[in-house]
Image: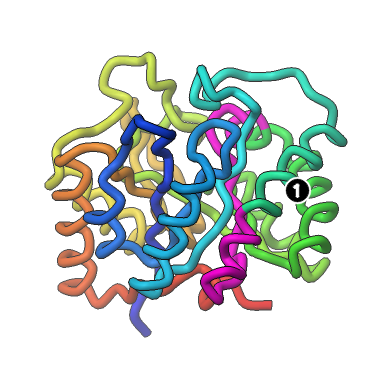
Amino acid sequence: MANVVDINCDMGESFGAYSLGRDEDVIKCISSANIACGFHASDPMVMDRTVRLCQEHHVGAGAHPGYPDLLGFGRRFMDISPVEMDNYVVYQAGALQGFLQKHGMSLQHIKLHGALYNNLVNQPDLFLQFVRQVSKIFGNPVFLTLATGKTILLKEKARREGLRIALEAFPDRQYTDEGELAPRTHSGSVLNDPEQIAKRAVEMVVKSGVVSINGQWLDMDIDTLCIHGDNLQSIQAAKMIVNAFKREGIQIKPLGEIITK
């Protein structure tokens, strides 16, 4: 049977007069969209426009909530309590849910953004606690977290509780030997060569893993690949990934069809 994987992208990150990302181009290459909800980027008009774009292209829509850090684009850590975190996410995902209902769509998934995402990667118990609390509010959506050796067990534990977790990999990012994303501040941590990115995407899915920045092999259980739509190279890479997957017999499906209840 052919491999099956989702392709997701962070979208709707423009704000007011400021335009960010090439959403109209990248939407043609993905199966799921992570839509900013106003705390790190976006506004009501952008959210409405992005949801409509997903509806038109039959792309699964999810919330992309982060810390209330508009100036820092959600990439700065904030010391908040678990209750605050849950409420911040409910607030943001709830806002998106209104726009989804307006366009006849449902909330497929929730993917935390930036520093909030990275903070919970190393706290699997807190992440699972967060999933338990928020899942029941939004009808058991899929929750994304980084694919590492540790999160395979987390996914299995969640499944036993009837919760849905998808493990995510980044073909345009380098990994540390510990299986985490190399910091953006490190030289070479973000890849820009479309051919290299497409080749890594295929390898990640076919071989279930990736080579770290120091040449160490990392085993992974990958449900979805994240691509970025903020520059021309990313769009080229997205198109090359789709074509490469067709050649390799890899099916692209939205998360809701891969991580079933």
Query: Residue 121 appears in which quarter of the rendering?
Result: top right
Question: Furthest-bottom residue in view?
Answer: 1
Say which of 185 and 249 sits in front.
Answer: 185
Say which of 178 and 136 sits in front.
Answer: 136
Q: Position of residue 58 (x, y in %)?
A: 39, 75
Query: Residue 232 appears in which quarter of the rendering?
Result: top left
Callout 1 amino acid: Val
Residue 45 in sight in this render: yes
Residue 159 in sight in this render: no
* Color encoding of the figure: rainbow
Q: Residue at x 48, y 56 (%)?
A: 48
Q: Does the segment drawn in magenta span residue 98? A: yes
Q: Which quadrant of the rendered structure holds the C terminus?
A: bottom right
Say which of 155 and 10 sits in front.
Answer: 10
Q: Position of residue 181 (x, y in %)?
A: 45, 31
Above or below — where is 14 with respect to 205? above
Q: Determine which residue is flagged by label 1.
A: 90
Q: Position of residue 128 (x, y in %)?
A: 78, 49
Above or below — where is 120 with respect to 72? below
Q: Residue at x 32, y 25 (%)?
A: 189
Say which of 125 and 44 sits in front.
Answer: 44
Above or below — where is 138 with respect to 47? below
29 left or right, relative to 125: left
Q: How many marks?
A: 1
Q: Residue at x 55, y 73 (%)?
A: 105
Q: Residue at x 82, y 32 (%)?
A: 84
The residue range painted magenta reads 96-119
Q: Alpha-carbon neighbours of circle 1 within 10 Å: few (<14), some, or many (≥20)?
A: some
Regarding mark 1 in the picture, which secondary structure is present there?
helix
